[in-house]
Image (cartoon, rainbow, N blue to C red):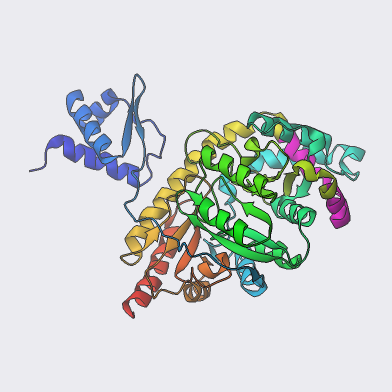
Amino acid sequence: MTVLYNRIADQIQELIQQGAYRTGDRLPGVRVLSRQFGVSIATILQSHQVLEGRGFVDARERSGYYVRLPPSQTPVPTVDQVQSRPTPVSARELAVEMVRAAQDRTLVPLGAAVPHSDFMPMRQMQQAASWAARLGRDAQDYAFPGKLVLRRQIAQRMTALGAPTVPDQLVITTGAQEAITIALRSVTKPGDIVALESPFFPGILHSLELLGLRVIEIPSDPSQGISLEGLQLALEQWPVAACIVVVNHSNPLGCRLSDARKQRLVRMLSTAKVPLIEDDIYGDLPLEGERPRPAKAFDREGNVLYCGSFSKTLSPGMRIGWLQPGRYLEEALQQKYFMNIATSTIPQLAVAHFLEQNGYERFLRTVRQRYAEALERMRTAVGHYFPEGTAVSRPVGGFVLWVQMPDGCDGTEIFRQALGEGISVAHGRLFSLSDKFQNCLRLNGANPWDEKIEKALKRLGEMALLQASKR
């Protein structure tokens, strides 16, 4: 016979798993639950102890009990540590195929790393854009290298992160993609070799191919980030012209370099006289704890070209990014001017207005909690529906999951089959110039959890199970 407090713990746990209480919510007081369940306060306290042991609640002194979802026991992916050789870039067809799928709103959006509108301050941004559009001439002029009011807000944020910046050191760009392209144009020439963490963000291939650059892939650990030993070996063997790294919450692994490793990375590249292009687009989205410092905070020689964006937090459509190019400022200004003169003015003013209202940090605190909950639900679902032996990343930030299926599973085939059934996913071949991630998928966790999402994950799991059974 089940002890009474265990039965009550089971009922509360079921409410948590069904979403009645979300991660971070405070459970009703013990007296309220005592009346609700018709039991003593002592029994409620015992049930809370059971839930705490299971990992579903945290007790906070003088505050009560707060909901958390226990981490899934699904294993973490492994990454091949074999060193690659410089490779020409050619990946247009696969990337365009995925982008087209991401634009189709009839599909379940598990492919592109774009947040659902529910995870963004849509109303506030609409109000800010409306305000900006009424500013008359100030909203219509070219804004090269960017509106001062926006550059001032960004400079303040970067300085607070330990990377002292003044507005005149910033170039406003049309998203982080353009910031990275300008950075590459500023420090490389066609035929040069660029070191890239692997698996890498597939969008970077567009810039690399456009500029005629070659890539050497550096293995990245799912928990530690880019292999500094592998990078050092590449620096010794090849004439590397630049290195691109996402040190905070990489896409697709969601890992983060420690401050010590960031400092070592910056020092290593500075010693080798190789510019570091830092993509910090997910830096504002840790799943818990403080916002981590960028590698730029450890740069004392202007060797780090820092790329940021509000596309993953405020609005993808605004297309507002920026570049702090260190000692390559003049080159970056020229490249920006030659590419398109200036980024659209009204979105710049709208983002600056939102930042001035001091609502950004409040918004981030709320959305980080929601991402943590959404990703853990998705990890649990993948562990339940996918074949035995499937490994799933445990990101510390951002909102994507990296799924490594058993050998014999073909992510590209699953992508095509899923597309035919109304589901968009990103397959592993997009994240390397080799086929070493053929059995992998990346899933976008920035969606409200509902029956449609769960059914899509179940169907993907069935496809993987069928492939695994044929090995």
Residue 138 appears in which quarter of the rendering?
top right
Q: Residue furthest bottom?
A: 470
Q: Position of residue 250 (x, y in %)?
A: 55, 51
Asked if 421 appears above or below 309 in the picture, the reply is below
Q: Is residue 349 magenta?
A: yes
The residue sitting at 74% across, 56% down in the picture is: 184
Left or right of 311 on screen, residue 424:
left
Of 272 and 430, the residue lying toward us: 272
Q: Position of residue 396 (x, y in %)?
A: 47, 45
Count of picture labels: 0
Farthest residue in the top direction? 62
**What is the x, y in percent for residue 317?**
70, 52
In the picture provided, is 345 more to the left or to the right than 408? right
Q: Quadrant of the C terminus?
A: bottom left
Q: Nearer the viewer, residue 282 or 421?
A: 282
Q: Is residue 337 left or right of residue 196?
A: right
Where residue 150 appears, as percent x and y from the top left, is 77, 36
Residue 447 visible in this rendered orientation of the protein = no
Q: Which residues are magenta?
A: 333-354
Q: Is residue 462 left or right of residue 342?
A: left
| Residue at screen point 61% across, 46% down | 268
Nearer to me, 395 or 44:
395
**Residue 376 visible in the shown view:** yes
Which residue sits at x=58%, y=39%? Answer: 263
Taking 438 as reference, is 359 above or below it? Answer: above
If the image is split into quadrants, where does the N terminus sit?
top left
Check residue 9 for magenta coloring: no
Q: Quarter of the image holding residue 467? A: bottom left
What secondary structure predominates along the stretch shown in magenta?
helix
- Relative to residue 437, is residue 147 depicted above or below? above
Q: Residue furthest left?
A: 1
